[in-house]
Amino acid sequence: MSDENNIPKLPNDDDRGMGTGLAVKPRSRTKKPAMYKVLMLNDDYTPMEFVVYVLERFFNKPADEATQIMLHVHQRGVGVCGIFTYEIAETKVTQVMDLARQNQHPLQCTIEKDGDGDGEGDE
Ligand code: TYC
């Protein structure tokens, strides 16, 4: 007899739970917050030194990095000042635009959604 123990064998009885082709990503219980890029836009009038000052003061950039970011924006039209949660990004934009307005510079900053950090590609 081939079925010695009298228990009928189901197809694939030997690999239950395997080889189904399903890839299941374990859920993370703690979700990382959505993150937002603060972008700075170029214009023809804001002095370069003012932009460098803003990057140092509000984005805590060292002088050399602030200068690099400013030149990048000057040459390419837009650049990233930093990446923050929404509330902090909003606050930075308000601070920059307020100071620019007080000094009668047309400098503009905007917010753009970054990934939310869960790797599920909603950028
Ligand atoms: N383009 C400006 C100038 O030539 C400098 C500048 C750089 C302005 C970056 C804005 O976000 C900016 N004076």
Image (spheres, grey):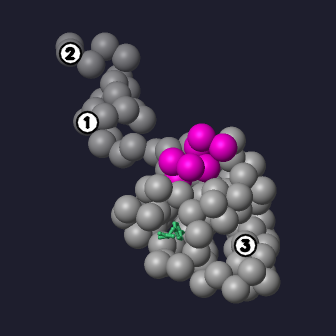
Give the quarter of the image for residue 92.
bottom right
Task: Determine which residue is flagged by label 2.
Answer: 2
Q: Residues within 10 Å of mark 3 (few under 14, many from 20)?
A: many
> Measured from the top left, where is residue 94 in percent x and y?
76, 78
In magenta stretch: residue 73: no
Contact check, label 3 and label 2, Cβ < 8 Å: no
95 sits left or right of 8 in the view: right
Give the secondary structure at mark 1. Answer: loop
> Measured from the top left, where is residue 52 in percent x and y?
64, 57
Q: Report the mark closest to the observer, 3 or 2.
A: 3
Look at label 3 and name its amino acid. Answer: Val
Give the secondary structure at mark 3. Answer: helix
Give the secondary structure at mark 2. Answer: loop
- Vertical relation: 60 (above or below) 87: above
Disc assigned to residue 11:
1
Look at label 2 and name its amino acid. Answer: Ser
Disc assigned to residue 1:
none
Which range is magenta? 63-69
- Vertical relation: 48 (above or below) 29: below
